[in-house]
Amino acid sequence: MSTATTNQVAKESFGSKDSKLSVLGFFMALPPILVLGTFIGLPIGLAFFLSLGYTGGLNEVISIIGQDVRARDGKLFTLQAYQDVIKDPRFLGDLRTTLLVSLFATILVLFFSIGIGLIQRLRGGKLSSLLTALSLTPLFIPVVISAWALYTFYGGAGLYQTLLKSFGFDVPQITSTVVAIVIGSVWTSLPFAILMITSGFQSIPNALIEAAQDAGAGIVTIIRTVMLPLAFIPIVIVATFTSIGVMGSFTIPFFLGPNQPTMFGVEITNFFTAYNRPQQSIVMAFIVFLAASGIAVMYIWANFRSAKESGRV
Amino acid sequence: MSQQNEIGLELKGLSKVLGGRVIIDNLDLQVKKGEMVSLLGPSGCGKTTTLRMIAGFLIPDNGTVTLAGKDVTTIGPEKRPSAMVFQNYALWPHMTVFKNVAYPLKVRKVNKAEIEKRVHDVLGVVNLMHHKDSRPAQISGGEQQRVALARALVQEPDILLLDEPLSNLDAKLRVKVREDIRDLQRRLGITTVIVTHDQDEALSISDRIAVMKEGKIEQFSTPEDIYNKPATEYVANFIGSLNRYEGSYSNGQISTGSDVVGVRPEDVTFDSKNSAGAVEATVSLVVPRGHFHEVYLKAQ
């Protein structure tokens, strides 16, 4: 009996210690949560309600200043601002441009990073080290500088055109086209992609590759059946982060892209500042957010699949 | 059947330098077809390097590797008639047990029905049919080891190479799995080379043992010979315990001399009559070892 009582006391004392620690942990986590809630959560919430026609309260000032602001007029909400955006002929062009640029930039980033990662993992040596070092260079150059450098390089009478013209090739100007946005996006996204994918390939134990070789597989089969599936998570991370990053980019499409159609990053800014249509710019931002959420679901699914494979779930 | 056909593996004048250090130095070895041979030695003696040259992961600087009568010295591992079980099993975590075992057949484009049949057969042999849909992370170390073995066996190789396959298992499981491997090897009659640094494992599992030292084979013989008639002092010391005396041996007695005489502990007998040749000693330490005791004596 006395043992039981002792155990109970011990349990109670542990229990009270645990709850004290929980409270302490909660208060330690509270400041960053409050900062996030106030400076990110609240503006997102306000913007979302403004897009649905809530023009009062903290949205009142922007609703008065902005043009074409659609109010809910006593209804629960209105989708008028969404209709304005969707019916605007610029919207579909911008949507197509944003999605295509994101898709092509992501494919190219994956192609280069997987290629360099594979060379690094399978061959090693000076060439792969040089390639990796060169591919990390954009990491140390601010995007605005890179964008300007690309603009002058690919622009009219830039080095690219001048050099090719001197060899008799009359090539069109690349700047102010979506091709330039893709090139710029690949430039800015490549370092992170290479770091992720190279580390993914490096973490595959030699024995797993050798076991496939021993089983009779050639190098292409080993890459397809062993290396790519084992580096699946870093590849998905690169694909999702690159596509979301490119989708919401501003500097590269602003400097290098065409005026119209352009990417959402530029168009949202134009609607917000130049056209003074804050509600429509918010609607566009939510549409981009929805697209990015779809990509994020892919990321979560990939993580779940990986956890399942490793027996964690 | 000619003698040549009976040789499962032949290494001739094999040498390998890695990082400026001679790892394998003019090594010769002949393994008969269906025989199980252990490469035994301490870490760094070159046993894994030898195995990797047999498997094709390393190309020797000199010498030849002949598998089942075919010179494979410069052929890559994917084209050799050998299959290897890796130290950490090297199972692909993203594939089920069935897919891991089926992989070698799939890459060789064996038809689906044949793959199904052979994989089921081999999983039956290693008693893992109930785990065919599990992933490697969901099964125990011993079961993973058997999957690795099944993956090697399904290829029906001319030679099976085992790289310290039991080193990651606990002591009890190690004994069971090594018996399973030996039983399987005998039943299938497959030529097998096993790398180990565990003398008990080598003595209990092998037809012959190659004791290695600094890239060379010190002695290549049956476990009985290796234990009872070691060719060198190194072999005698490496296998089992040894009492070492400087002297000469004749008629069951050790007398003064300049030679080295080794006596196995189990050959030391207790003599209460103080017979000729007996040495007086006092017990300095007794270590219980389960089913026997290790007794340390201090000679007077």
Image (tube, coloured by chain):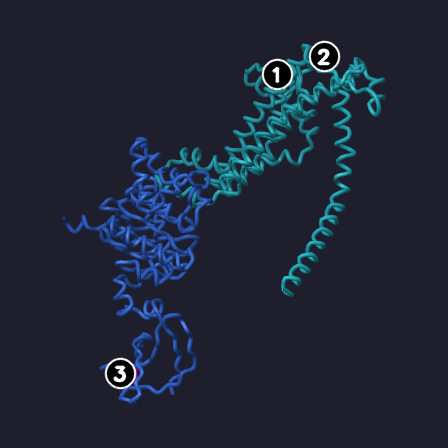
Chain colours: A cyan, B blue
Q: Which mark is residue A84?
A: 2
Report whether mark 1 lies on the same chain as mark 3.
Answer: no
Inspect the image, locate mark 1, and give the three-letter code of the amino acid beneath it. Arg
Quadrant, the C terminus of chain B? bottom left
Which percent across, then down, holds residue A249?
67, 25
Q: Nearer the viewer, residue A28 or B45?
A: A28
Inspect the image, locate mark 2, and give the three-letter code of the amino acid beneath it. Asp
Which percent across, then down, holds residue A80?
73, 13
Report whether mark 2 lies on the same chain as mark 1.
Answer: yes
Residue at 40 percent across and 34 percent down: it is: A221
How far apart are the alpha carbons under marks 2 and 1? 18 Å
A210 vs A237, left or right, is left
Please say whether residue A268 is one of the residues in the magenta stretch: no
Residue at 55 percent across and 18 percent down: it is: A167
- Asked if one can make out residue A186 in the rendered structure from this viewpoint, the answer is no
Query: In the displayed structure, would residue B262 be above or below residue A157?
Result: below
Report whether mark 2 lies on the same chain as mark 3.
Answer: no
> Is disc 2 surrounded by few (<14), some (14 to 19) or many (20+) residues within 10 Å?
some
Q: Which mark is residue B253?
A: 3
Q: Quadrant of residue A103?
A: top right
Q: Chain of mark 3?
A: B
Report which residue position mark 1 lands on. A96
Query: In the displayed structure, would residue A286 be above or below residue B292?
Result: above
- Asked if one can make out residue B267 in the rendered structure from this viewpoint, the answer is yes
Please say whether residue B256 is one of the residues in the magenta stretch: yes
Q: Nearer the viewer, residue A56 or B42?
A: A56
Q: Chain of mark 1?
A: A
Which percent across, then down, holds residue A39?
78, 33
> Is disc 1 surrounded by few (<14), some (14 to 19) or many (20+) residues within 10 Å?
some
Please identify the residue farthest to the front as the structure is shown: A1
Which residues, given as a range, are shown in magenta? B253-257
